[in-house]
Image (cartoon, rainbow, N blue to C red):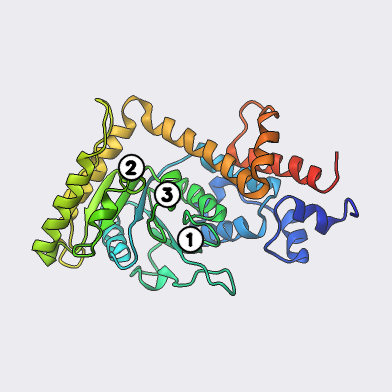
Amino acid sequence: MVRNRPAERLRAVGFTEIGTSAMVRAMTRPIPSLSEIRAGGKPAVARALTLIETAHGSEGLARLLDEATANPKADVIGLTGPPGVGKSTLTNALIARARAEGRSVGVVAVDPSSRFTGGALLGDRTRLRTDPEDQGVFVRSMAARDRLGGLSDHAVAAIVLMRAVYDLVLVESVGIGQSEGDIASVADTVLLCIQPGSGDSLQFMKAGVMELPDVVCVTKADMGDPARRALADVAGALTLASHGPDDWIAPVVMVSSTAGTGLDELAAAVAAHAAWLDAAGRRAVLRAAQARDWVADAIRVRFGLRGLAAVAAVSAPAGEGPFGAIRRLDGVLGARLSGGP
């Protein structure tokens, strides 16, 4: 293998989804600071999110994302649930409510990927009704790519960046299943949406599903009896889990986004969970664990179990952020795989 060729070296550290000329330009393109992005409004945010894909693996981007990791502003709410449950309609309602309260909102809508282009298949932006002139709302659709858990590494980076810019970040995931728990790795509050009459009662009993949510929302509450039966089924499933005295127990609320009912109760449940997180430093503990998970997941995906074993033997520099760690370990393991020292 020829060593030190720019294209080969760039591919070794993760530049696998863009052309060689674009990779070279990305390495020399100036990366804005977090303060510049905050001051630059929606155009600056859009350019920064583009850099997450085109400058993936660069030192400047890693510095920016680590700065964003260390300076969060937003509460992050992750919405998940089966397709058709009404996640987009509920997201619309949450956006409108936050804007009425004067809070800025960033939305990351994660869609299934096209088998042919790798891009977002459905394009959730088409289902979210936002005013393009409103500088306080920014929506970005992103593809899940080949991730069963629903969030690609680009989506995680986008959420981290938007978390440092906006007051509230909403993450609408592809959907939930027993292997689709990535939403918990980025959200402060996981909101599980349940549709009445969907036949999901047995699904509620599966530990992998019911361990995820911090708040459960039965959508389409205007359906009446089916909605009340769904609420009872979910509440019953939640009682099967064991809880310690200090554990959070997920409340269950019924919401009709179209009728505008139940939104006050949902907001109160989310606020109660946020207050619980802020007590005794739980939010800081949660986010530190999430950052560790991002590093382990990135190395697992790119280098597998052998990479994780090699990482365990490498000491991390003091104060290193998760994105800097990913870039450093990318370089170390990429060089080994390509025959370097």
Residue neighbourhood size for the residue with mark 1, other residues' Cα within 10 Å, grouped as few (<14), some (14–19), many (≥20): many
Q: Where is mark 1, residue-wise?
A: 42
Most foreground residue, 314 or 304 = 304
x and y percentages locating residue 230 in the rendered image: 17, 56
Q: Where is mark 3, residue-wise?
A: 181
Q: Is residue 318 above or below residue 233?
A: above
Residue 93 shows in this picture: yes
Q: Residue at x 59, y 36 (%)?
A: 321
Give the SS element for disc 2: loop
Q: Where is mark 2, residue-wise?
A: 211
Q: Amino acid at mark 3?
A: Gly
Q: Amino acid at mark 2?
A: Glu
Q: Amino acid at mark 1?
A: Lys
Give the SS element for disc 3: loop
Q: Residue at x 75, y 56 (%)?
A: 11
Mark nearer the N terminus (1 vs 3): 1
- Nearest to viewer (mark 2 / mark 1): 2
Residue neighbourhood size for the residue with mark 2, other residues' Cα within 10 Å, grouped as few (<14), some (14–19), many (≥20): few
